[in-house]
Amino acid sequence: MNLLKLSWKYLTASKLSSLLSIILVALGVSLTSILFLLNKQFSDRLYNNIAGIDLVVSAKGSPLQMIMSSVYQIDNPTGIIPLTESFVVTKNPFVEKAIPLAMGDNYKGYRIIGTDSQYVAHYGAKIATGRAIQQDLEVLVGSRAAKKLNLNIGDTFYGSHGLIEDGGELHDAHQYKVVGVLAESQTVVDQLIVTNVASVWRMHEGHDHDHEGEHGHGDEHEGHDHATHDDHERHDHEGHDDHEGHDHATHDDHEGHDHATHDDHEGHDHATHDDHEGHDHATPVAEKPLAPISSEGKSVSAYLVTYKKDGNGNASARAFVECSQIIDKYGKSMGYAKPSIQLQRLLEMTGVGIGFLKGLAFIIIFISALSMFISLFTSLKDRKYEIALMRVGGASRTKIFLMIVLEGLMLAAIGLIVGLTISHIGMQLMAATLEENYKYTFTGALFLIQELWLIIGTLIVGFLAAVVPAIQAYLTDISTTLSSK
């Protein structure tokens, strides 16, 4: 006797009840699985991006906004840090590394970030093609941004004012030139266009009006900051970077080169607009020399801070306390946020909704178990005579028991397969929308250890739903059943 085949025939004989049980199992499994996939991928990306960052220093404002804007690049900056206060961070005795960020522009919705070589190195992003930045107006493009914008080595483009696409005026005084494309790092860098801080200064010279009191141009409607640096911090943020290769504020006649003199492989070129490609391709046309950039009246949007280490290579315990105290005392316009604390708060807020959905999924699975139990228990009443005949024909009590259990397991297994298929295909279909909204890569081609436990749990539910009807079938009295017929 083929128990598997016999169990299948009984299930197909009661199509509606079997289908209802399968749908309920699939619904509960798919909802639980997709929550696992979303939670895992979101959490990984959130934690990857704060690794090694002990403090975010920006203008006073919401700590969570500081983290979202400066680390995750999905919110507007809280303001600007004037040049005269930058020493509070860069000369802080408890700071090992302070990465400057100059934000405020975008290209087709992808942010252009002015920073130094430490930023790309901090996230472990490697240059896949091209070279590092050597002078102003050169950019490195993150892997995702390069793919979506179809930017390649040598392409040029104009940035736009603001942090959203079509959010502000075009900066058509200068063009950026792509000199390198970064390999995928699964961090925020993948979605960015990275340049040096002086390039962002240069783009906003017309907005600064050379008045220190006008730093906030455009902040109210764009959350836009004009990136700047202190005179005495100039060397810290630009001169120390090997890949930037020169001081943007001064030029030596002896060096014999300035921003205006370019050869075929280093030059800034005028671009011809290409409506089909969405960016410009460089053409070897000479342009006017770029005047030196003055650091007077400039500012930066934020600093990503790493504390000094103790003898064991861990962040200094004193740094945790005294670094922020120094900022409180001397940084008049500065605020700060600790990424680990703010991320925990964010996950706690979102965790309530996720927990509710998980609870709902488990309730659905429980209802599916109840549906299987009712279906099997009801069908058993109609099958008592057949079971008695099977016993007369030589089937043992154990085989009868296993046949009913197999029916429950088969219902659970089919629902499980359907549910997992729906969740992974659904996640893959959602990936494009999630990437568009959050600029991170998501995938449905991922199997988690939590899903293994989900599989085991669902099969256990199927077994438990069938075990009571199976016991009842096991205890069926042959003579009583046949005589009552």
Image (cartoon, rainbow, N blue to C red):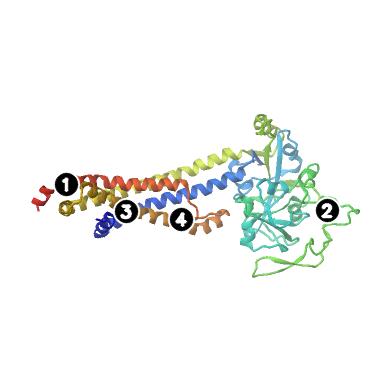
Q: Position of residue 150 (x, y in %)?
A: 64, 64
Q: Mark 3 points at which residue?
A: 410
Q: Residues within 10 Å of mark 3 (few under 14, many from 20)?
A: many
Closer to viewer: mark 2 or mark 3: 3
Whether label 4 touches label 2, CB < 8 Å = no
Q: Position of residue 167 (x, y in %)?
A: 63, 58
- Identity, as a three-letter code, of the amino acid under mark 2: Pro
Among the two numbered marks 3 and 1 on one chain, the one whose residue lies closer to the N terminus: 3
Q: Name the residue under label 1.
A: 476
Q: Position of residue 154 (x, y in %)?
A: 73, 63
Question: What residue is at 52 percent from the left and 49 percent from the top?
Answer: 41
Whether label 4 touches label 3, CB < 8 Å = no
The vertical placement of 243 against 95, above or below, is below
Question: What residue is at 57 percent from the left and 46 percent from the top?
Answer: 46
Rounded to the nearest angstrom, the CA distance separating label 4 from label 2 is: 54 Å
Side (left or right) of 1 relative to 39: left
Q: Which mark is residue 424?
A: 4
- Report helix, strand or loop for mark 4: helix
